[in-house]
Image (cartoon, rainbow, N blue to C red):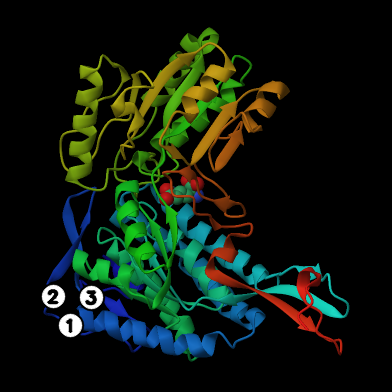
Amino acid sequence: MDILKKLNLNSLNFGACTGEKEWSNTITEGELVSYNPATEKPIASIYQCAKADYENIVIQAEKNFLIWRQVPAPKRGEILRLIGEELRKQKDRLGSLISLEMGKSKKEGDGEVQEMIDMADFAVGLSRMLYGKTMHSERRAHRMYEQWQPLGIVGIISAFNFPVAVWAWNAFLAAITGNTVIWKPSPKTPLCALAVQHICNKIMAQEKLTGLFSVFITDNNTLAEHFVSDPRISLVSFTGSTAIGKQISKLVAHRLGKSLLELSGNNAVIVDETADLQLAVPAIVFGAVGTAGQRCTTTRRLIVQEKIYDKLIFKLVNAYKKITIGNPLDEKNLLGPLIDAAAVENYITTLEEVKKRGGKILFGGQQIRGVGYYVEPTLVEAKNEWDVVQRETFAPILYIMKYKTLTDAITMQNHSLYGLSSSLFTNQLQHAELFLSACGSDCGIANINIGTSGAEIGGAFGGEKQTGGGREAGSDAWQAYMRRQTTTINWSDKLPLAQGIKFE
Ligand code: UN1
């Protein structure tokens, strides 16, 4: 438990905080226990916060917003630069804590911290590039332009699978654009959130700020609903399942607030007859097995041209045989456990349903008995139209199917409620261009000769249809955290009306 100490965590922690000396002290709301999915043993506990703690956080965040919005954006960038520096120092420890609490491999845990660092760097650069457009007015001696202003408080609800990186996508953009941030992390990974809060606290204290980054931890749905329905939270950014996303979007819409949704996916890789299988096979394995199939970008469907089908399956089965499974903190292992017993149950019942429908298991398919929530990575021949194939199951199950023409393959891929990530492996220009054309992939992410997961932060991340439509991280995603203001300045001595209207 050395990592806990080094990250300022104890065996029993308080669950709400707005700054270094601003921790809650409520002990009446029960403890939330964080478990290690590799051992099923508790790691540490957290006193859950009460409604009064939440109230205090919102008041602090509102108060700090009045100060923070006046800080010039490049100066705000300095805070993000310092947080990025601190994350660099803590990368190894925080990466290990992610691996310990969430169960992803150590390499992926470190990768997640790197994603935060990249986001911090991006936000620093962005702090000098929050550009607005200027327009030519139709009236003489009038100037028109648009400018971007902060919203107020940005609320972030993050999922267990990326316990810290997805917070960073949102929090760093929200902060650089002049908002204050309140975070409700997944109750399955509270320690990662507390470790990040300690890092933020250190920098906030140095810069004499409170309430810029706050956290509150609870598994109480009433309090979570109160947060989402709270009109003081200008934007609610939610990452999680489509089912919960629908409820959240309804609550936020009811008060005409803003929401940013990053929900489920059912991502496919298409492999055509010209594809370089040396590239395709490792990309498919990483996409389907990385994070034990618990990424929103996980490759869940594989659509293969019939001429190369047997060859690809042969190579894939061989690659699956080499996947090392076990303690995620041991760097030789590629596949760690699922998050909890319910996830294992879901894996089992999903595969039962697949078999009932006539699916043929080509590899894996079993829970791994013993300590820890381990399952075998699984390859199964299936039909695209089966309900079970159309559902997102957060587990390393890859459904494989054949196609004849690329148009058929694209139709199969787009036949999904979701539209997050997609990719085509090909060496034929026309195929690549068709896939990327208006008749091609309908997803927010469309890749050529790269898998569906592991996106860089520089692009806008998100998806269409029931994936929710939000865009986070790079490109112009920052605009979601600001309000646009259109301004017209008349510097003439007349008052001409638009559209040439005379009103005299
Ligand atoms: C998620 O699973 O919610 O593209 C995010 C990826 C990661 C982010 C996944 N950079 O796979």
Q: Who comes first in sequence, dot 3 or dot 1?
A: 3
Q: Nearer the viewer, residue 460 or 189?
A: 460
Secondary structure state at the residue bearing disc 1: loop
Q: Quadrant of the C terminus?
A: bottom right
From the viewer's side, name the closer residue of 186 and 20: 186
Q: Report whether residue 162 is seen.
A: yes
Q: Mark 2 and ligand 1: say if the CB distance to the nearest ligand atom is below 8 Å.
A: no
Q: Residue at x 52, y 75 (%)?
A: 175
**Which x, y percent locates residue 231?**
37, 75
The residue to which callout 2 is attached is 29
Question: Mark 2 belongs to which amino acid?
Answer: Glu
**Can you say whether 494 is above or below 283 in the image?**
below
Using the rendered view, name the quadrant where residue 120 is placed.
Answer: bottom right
Q: What amino acid is labelled 1 in the image? A: Thr
* Residue drawn at the location 25% of the way across and 25% of the way down: 365
Residue 415: x, y in percent? 45, 28
Considering the numbered disc 3 on the image, is that residue within a helix, a strand or a loop?
strand
What whole-number distance in Å separates the C-alpha atoms at marks 2 and 3?
Answer: 13 Å
